[in-house]
Image (tube, rainbow, N blue to C red):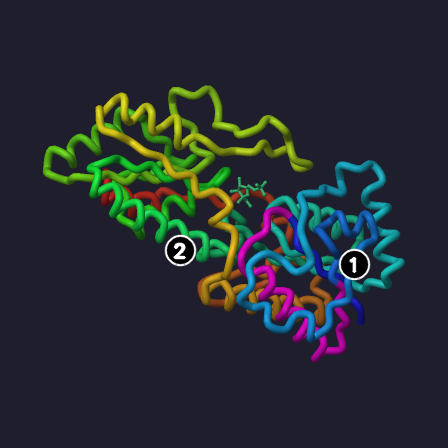
Amino acid sequence: MRIGILTGGGDCPGLNAVLRAVVKKGLQCDIEVLGILNGWKGLLDGEAEPLSEVRVSGIIDRGGTLIGTSRTNPMKNPNGLQLCRQTWERFGLQGLIAVGGDDTLSVAAKFHEAGLPVVGVPKTIDNDIASTDFTFGFDTAVSIATEAIDRLHTTAESHQRIMVCEVMGRHAGWIATFAGLASGADCIIIPEFPMRMAKVAEIINERRKKGKSFSLVVIAEGAKPEFAADVIKQSMKLDEFGHVRLGGVGHLVAEEIERLTGIETRVTILGHVQRGGTPTAFDRILATRFGLAAIGLVLERQWGMMVALRGNEIVPVPLKEATATKKLVPREWFALAEVFFG
Ligand code: F6P
């Protein structure tokens, strides 16, 4: 049997661990794996690389993706599905594993509806895919953000400053909530639970009155402050899935906090540092388990399904269900964080 695998959307630590698991397990089950280059673009353009056992050896600890990624949306092209079908037939594929976030998996769901045999593997540092408790990449991003905030802590303390740290999270504030909790932030601002700037200033002022000499504020890039008409964008250019490039809310919020408190405030925007480099052991193992389970779905011809983590089990869920909504931070998770700044 011959299948393809592609990685789409923003890259994420753990993608190589999935490729390694799929290829190694696949070969043991007589499945040959073709790496489709640069996400859906490779299927449109007919670009692929056969993945041998040697090619995927020694990559479990490597960030990024061996076969490249892109934000190409084949559905934007009126002939996209047809072109992909042609490549599919030319490559002699009998199935495809699509590893991606919401956008990539939504395309996979459409391919399945069109009769193409596809299974999905969820990935994103944002952890916002419905139907799975966690996505790989998230733990790495949280670890990087936590370490960064710990470092901001010592310099903030030395200068008695307020430090604002902006982390990724377009629609969901999972990274901000977890990293903020883990690093003992004074305030966490996320898209799901907007906080007024006066409230942030009040929390900081109260703590300063009690003798605290530094303050840490963590904000998700997609949080919209009440003084802004919309989320803060770096660029208005839309990608093929209709997303603008976010970034910079930390600067505006820091200015406002400094104005309201009169305390010197500095900003750090972590950006792509959160997505690069070596995955944590947790992410390597989750990605490996997802890869092995995806081969299981291929063997059982469970097309149109996505592997998901539920508790400690890996289970199949319909791609359609997983891509129908986003998994936002629920009130009970945010309430945990609020214990420390509410
Ligand atoms: O993959 C999701 C994400 O991490 C978002 O949080 C962020 O807005 C986006 O990627 C940025 O990705 P890129 O710079 O690759 O477009």
Q: Which residue is mark 1?
A: 48
Residue depicted at 80% across the width and 68% down the height: 2
Q: Quadrant of the C terminus?
A: top left
In the image, residue 57 sits, relative to residue 254, either above or below, namely: below
Q: Nearer the viewer, residue 98 or 263?
A: 263
Tell me, yes or no, whether the highlighted magenta stretch contains residue 31: yes
Q: Quadrant of the N terminus?
A: bottom right
Residue depicted at 54% across the width and 51% down the height: 124
Image location (x, y in percent) of residue 74: 76, 43
- Where ligand 1 lies, by quadrant? top right
On residue 123, the disc is none
User: Type of residue at label 2?
Assistant: Ser
Distance between mark 2 and mark 1 Cα atoms: 33 Å
Tell me, yes or no, whether the highlighted magenta stretch contains residue 196: no
From the viewer's perspective, is 294 left or right of 222?
A: right
In the image, residue 291 sits, relative to residue 217, either above or below, namely: below
Image location (x, y in percent) of residue 259: 27, 21
Mark 2 Cβ and ligand 1 under 8 Å apart: no
* Secondary structure at numbered mark 1: strand
User: Type of residue at label 1?
Assistant: Ala
- The answer to whether residue 328 is visible is yes
Q: Which residue is mark 2?
A: 143
In the image, residue 281 sits, relative to residue 86, either above or below, namely: below
* Secondary structure at numbered mark 2: helix
Magenta stretch in the rendered image: 9-34
